[in-house]
Amino acid sequence: MKIIIYLSLILFASNALAYSTNYLMLPNNETLTAQKWRIDTRSHFNVDKRYSDTQAIPPSTSLGATYGIFDNQELSVEAGLDWFEPTTQDNLNALRTHGKFLVSQNASPISVAIGFYEYAFKTNANSPNILYLQFEKKWDLTGAFKIGYFSGNSEVMVNENFQASNKGIIAGWARPLPELINSLTLSAEWMGSQSYKGGALIGTSWKLQNATFKIGYFIPTNKRIIRDSIFAQLNVDL
C-alpha cells in the first residue's frame, strides 16, 4: 500500500464568509453544487510514540468521491463512496459510503443536516457506520458554529474494555480569514466518544483554484487505544 501525503483547506471569501462541505474531518452543513464532483484523499500519521503498536490504532489512508445530487436555495443532497486502507483482502470491508441531506440557513435561522459517513456495505465490516443530526449557524464576524448528535456501530466504536462508546455529541467551529488570506480557514472539531473516533481536531485549510489542502492535529479522548496524529487531506473539485 502506498501512503498518500498531502495538506489542508476550507474556502472562504466574498462579502459574507463562504464555506466548503467539510471543514476538517467531520461533515458540516454544506453540500456540493448539483452535478459537481469532488475527489479527496486523506491520511492520519501517528506522532505519539508512548504506546506500542499493539495498543494503538494504526495510521490510515482513504480515497473518496462525492457527487452533488440536488440543490436549490433551501434544500440539497450529496452522496459518495470511500475506500479505506489498511483493510483485509475482502474488498467490501474497505468500501464505504457517505451522504447528506441539508436544509440550508436560507430556509431557516439555523441550517439542519441529516447524514451518514463511513457506512459499510457489509454488515460485519469493521466500520463505524456513523449517523448524525447536526445544526449549524453562521455569523459574518465569528464564523460558523455547529453542534449535533451521532450514533455509530456499537461493535466497532468501543473503549479499551470493549464497551460501546458509539453515541454522543459532535461540535465544531470554523472561521475564514479574509483579513489575512482570502482562501485560508481555521477550524476546530470535537466528537464525544471514548472510542478511536473520539477527540478534538484543530487545523487549517487552504484553497488553490480547484484544489483544497487541509492539515490538522488530532488529540484523542482515549489515549489508551489511539495515539495523537496528524490529519492531512487533499480535495479536488471537478
Image (spheres, rainbow, N blue to C red):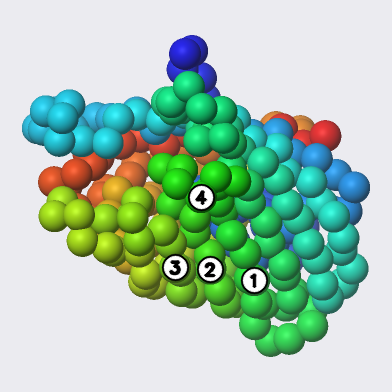
- Reply above or below: 108 against 117: below
Residue at x 76%, y 55% (from the top left corner): 78
> Which is more N-terminal, label 4 or label 1?
1
Q: Is residue 155 left or right of residue 37?
A: left
Residue at left offset 28%, top offset 63%: 165
x 33%, y 55%: residue = 155
Judging by the rendered image, the residue that carries numbered circle 2 is 132
Q: Earlier in the sequence, mark 2 or mark 4?
A: 4
Q: Are marks 2 and 3 in contact (CB under 8 Å)?
A: yes
**SS label for mark 2:** strand
Query: Is label 1 in contact with label 2 (beta carbons under 8 Å)?
Result: yes
219 is higher (above) or lower (below) than 75 = above
Mark 2, Cα crowd under 10 Å, few <14 / some 14-19 / many 20+, is: many
**Residue 74 in the image, given as x and y percentages of width and height:** 83, 75
The one of 124 and 78 positioned closer to us in this rendering: 124
Which label was assigned to residue 151?
Answer: 3
The nearer-to-camera label among 1 and 2 is 2
Q: Does residue 223 appear in the picture of this structure?
A: yes
Q: Amino acid at mark 2?
A: Tyr
Which of the two labelled residues, at mark 1 and mark 3, occupies the earlier sequence position?
1
Q: Which residue is mark 1?
A: 113
Residue that mark 4 sits on: 123
Spatial separation of the CA atoms under disc 4 and disc 3 = 16 Å
Whole-angstrom CA distance, mark 1 to mark 3, is 14 Å
The quadrant in which residue 184 appears is top right
- 20 relative position to 118: left or right: right
